[in-house]
Image (spheres, rainbow, N blue to C red):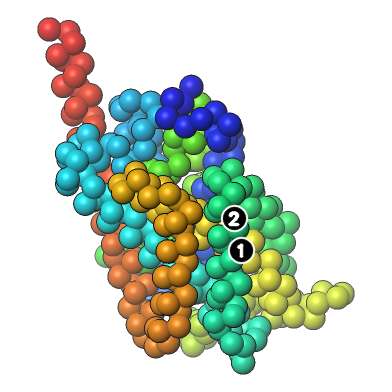
Amino acid sequence: MNNAVDEKYLISPFFIVPLMYVSMVGVGVLNFQRKVAEHAGYNAYISVVLAGISIHLIVWMIYKIFRSNQEGLDVTAINHTCFGKIAGNIINFAIVLYFFLGAYIEFEAYIEVIQVWNFPSIKILPLSTLLAALIYYTISGGFRTVTGLSFLGFLMTLIFIIPENLSVLPYAHPLNLMPLFNHSITDILLSSKSMLYQFLGFEALLLFYPFIKSPAKSQKWAHVMVLFVTFMYLMVIIITFMYFSEGQLREISWPTLNMLKIVEGPVFQRIEYLAISLWLLKNLSGISLSLWASCRGMKAIFRIKPRVSLLAFLVGFLILEYSLKDRAIFRWTSEFYSDVGFYFIYGYIPIIFVITQVRKSWNKGKSHR
């Protein structure tokens, strides 16, 4: 039983499925193909598989980290144990800013999609305020509310998004994938690094782990979702490569949405508009989870009530949205977040893993003396 969180706030192990999904799949699924293909071309599907395998390893490390510490702790408490209170709080605050930045980028990216595809002349500030209000309503309801919204976002993907992508298959050209291996290992690894950006967000597990009832039982579901998301990205990128030539892909900003333009339904002639609308649930849940993690961190560091820090974060969203109108700055911010995420996942988490395993072995050796 989890001792740090009241049982009424806990979720069953299975519900890590929608949480892992919404944290790893964002607006980037609409345009990641072009970026990933920059280095490895149409061999970039190999990079998707490699990135997915590495995420499996990191998720395994996260579970080992928690099992090596007292039950009921999250990463903020573990940082205090490993680095001391002062250094631990500095690291914890950096983690808070990291999740805030990730949430803001997802927030801004979705607004950009709406502006480009649905309503080019719409005023952004009222739309941003409305989305911020929805996010506030979700997170203020607590972690279980965030989980419920994540479940709805996950269902929308299963029911609509995946079938919409598969409907493009009759127009695909498999020969676009040939030759199969014509890029170096270095190119494929560089593409894998680009692909990592799409998976960023799953590390919120470091903060919501104590909210899982019998958390050890959730590990299999976490790995199942990493596998599912990897295959989903693999499906989307292979369909994209078979639909567009490399020359065409270099000129297209939103490949997934451009593919959906060819599909027509009995009611909606522009299926991509429906996809963008349905994506609202999934995107709001992903943003809410990241901001919830930031608020949880602020509570652990400064004892600030989550609703207060949440309101401050959302006001920060609106200020950034109003003041940063240069898309080049947003692109730079996204690349910065991607770089920080790379070192967070492949640097910080392995370091914590090693420290906790050494401490566990040391304590076990002392107990046998």
- Are the residues flagged by discs 1 and 2 in contact, CB closer than 8 Å? yes
Q: As displayed, is residue 203 above or below residue 359?
A: below
Residue in the picture at 37% in, 72% down: 334
> From this viewpoint, which residue is outermost toward the top?
369
Q: As displayed, is residue 185 above or below residue 307?
A: below
Confirm whether residue 298 shows in the render: yes
Residue in the picture at 33% in, 66% down: 337
Confirm whether residue 235 shows in the render: no
Mark 1 is surrounded, within 10 Å at the Cα level, by few (under 14), some (14 to 19) or many (20 or more) other residues, namely some
Mark number, residue 134: 1
Q: Quadrant of the C terminus?
A: top left
Please, what is the three-letter code of the amino acid marked with disc 1?
A: Leu
Residue 324 image position (x, y, % from top left): 39, 83
Pick whichever, 1 or 252, lies toward us: 1
Please, what is the three-letter code of the amino acid marked with disc 2?
A: Thr
Left or right of 114 in this view: 82: left
Pick whichever, 285 or 357, lies toward us: 285
Left or right of 175 in this view: 47: left
Residue 10 image position (x, y, % from top left): 55, 34
Pick whichever, 335 or 220, lies toward us: 335
SS assignment at label 2: helix
> From this viewpoint, which residue is outermost toward the left?
369
SS assignment at label 1: helix
Corner quadrant of residue 56: top left
Q: As displayed, is residue 337 above or below residue 69?
A: below
Pick whichever, 299 or 334, lies toward us: 299
State the separation of the CA atoms marked 1 and 2.
6 Å
**Which residue is label 2 attached to?**
138
Mark number, residue 11: none
